[in-house]
Amino acid sequence: EEYYQALGIVPDGEWQSFMAALRRPLPITFRINGGGKYAEALKERLRSDFLSGLDLSKFEMPQGETASPPQPLPWYPSEGAWQMCFSRNQLRKEPQLERLHEFIKAANEAGTITRQEAVSMVPPLFLD
């Protein structure tokens, strides 16, 4: 904290909000590798098998935030990248997320998705 305070980049009245933002866990994000029919089938399976019946109404989020189902990142082409609002710990431990967690683990191990922070997905979009 001393480092950021010494920089003087955060107004005094915003200090607590700034520190809370730094402590908030990053959302889980992943991108679907490849394209074509296989990638489309993977997205359809994600939607139909894991998201259509996902009930997050009783899901507890920190600081009163509202849980939302995994969604495609709007700026990534062809819905090829997705984001979840819950933490890695919640994904591993919450019973209602167990099937989704197993799907993500299996797809990651098979190489059909790659877990990656959203910010790291941006540079390859400019390589074409």
Image: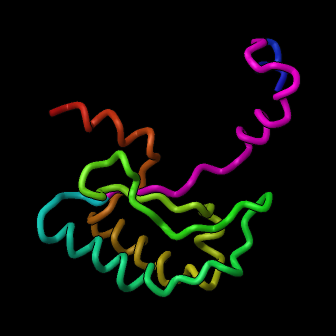
Q: Residue at x 78, y 19 (%)?
A: 3
Image quadrant where residue 81 sits: bottom left
Q: In the image, which residues are magenta?
A: 7-31
- Please state the horizontal and vertical placement of residue 63, each as a whole percent of the image: 80, 58
Task: Answer with left or right where residue 29 lies relative to residue 21.
Answer: left
Q: Which one is in front, 69 or 26?
A: 69
Q: Residue furthest left?
A: 36
Q: Is residue 114 above or below residue 21?
A: below
Quarter in which the N terminus is drawn: top right
Q: Residue at x 32, y 33 (%)?
A: 123
Position of the C terminus, as image quadrant, is top left
39 or 88: nearer the viewer? 39
Residue 87 screen position, x and y as percent: 62, 61
Q: Is residue 20 above or below residue 114?
A: above
Judge whether residue 8 is colored magenta: yes
Q: Which quadrant of the figure has residue 92?
A: bottom right
Is 37 drawn above or below residue 52 in the view shown?
Answer: above
